[in-house]
Image: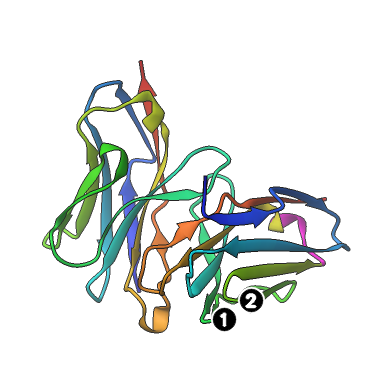
Amino acid sequence: DTEVTQTPKHLVMGMTNKKSLKCEQHMGHRAMYWYKQKAKKPPELMFVYSYEKLSINESVPSRFSPECPNSSLLNLHLHALQPEDSALYLCASSLFTEQPQHFGDGTRLSIL
Amino acid sequence: AQSVTQLGSHVSVSEGALVLLRCNYSSSVPPYLFWYVQYPNQGLQLLLKYTTGATLVKGINGFEAEFKKSETSFHLTKPSAHMSDAAEYFCAVSDGGGTSYGKLTFGQGTILTVHP
């Protein structure tokens, strides 16, 4: 069992829909991350939050909007996605940014 | 800039044989190095890490890796493969915290197949 919980596990949405991905951890970690992983590829960093502040945005399109309401919760709001956005979205957390990251099992997103 | 090269996108071994997965890195600062394993339809699980100190690090499930600065390598080994080791393995590098906020740069991954 992973200590980083992501919901939903699977999501199918149309290009005009608005949906959100959710990530929770209760380990007291102060850094949280969103990664995108395409099939047969390594994860690619999208966003980093440190102490609930957005610290890194890897030039991600604005149709992806992250939010960190508190130290345990990380959301990724999705709007007007494209078919190429279909991927596994992984959330990770670490005690501090220099500590190892712990990953959730991801949300598999399909855009119709 | 940092980069990771994993030699061999697929490695096949027999059950009980030595597992060797190769990783070379490039970093302008002392690196933090990690090995992660990913089973189908799951996230990444940390196997082991090197930050400072002892260059031979032991991880979970009998895996270990040795940091060799002169060779810029961090190869992953396991003396005896088990069927349950079949998965994809990623080597990753970061420069720790600071302005990179622990950003991980991953290699392309190596799929390990274990034959009975």
The chain to which mark 2 is attached is A
Query: Is the C terminus of chain B in the top left, top right, bottom left or bottom right quadrant?
Result: top left
Mark 2 residue type: Cys
Q: Is residue B14 above or below residue B4?
A: above
Q: Is residue B62 above or below residue A72?
A: above
The chain to which mark 1 is attached is A
Q: Is residue B77 left or right of residue A74?
A: left
Instruction: Identify the mark nearer the N-term, 2 or 1.
Output: 1
Display colour scheme: rainbow
Q: Residue at x 26, y 45 (%)?
A: B22
Number of other residues with Cα within 10 Å of mark 1, as a class: few under 14, some 14 to 19, many 20 or more: some
Q: What's the magenta region?
A: A80-84
Instruction: Farthest residue to the top: give it.
Output: B116
Q: Residue at x 23, y 48 (%)?
A: B75
Q: Position of residue A54 (x, y in %)?
A: 57, 82
- How far apart are the two marked residues, 2 and 1, measured between alpha carbons? 6 Å
Instruction: Farthest residue to the right: give it.
Output: A16
Q: Secondary structure at mark 1?
A: loop
Question: Residue A68: which numbered mark, if any?
Answer: 2
Question: Residue A52: which numbered mark, if any?
Answer: 1
Q: Position of residue A110 (x, y in %)?
A: 75, 50
Q: Are marks 2 and 1 in contact (CB under 8 Å)?
A: yes
Mark 1 residue type: Glu
Task: Count every numbered label the image shows and give the total.
Answer: 2
Q: Secondary structure at mark 2?
A: strand
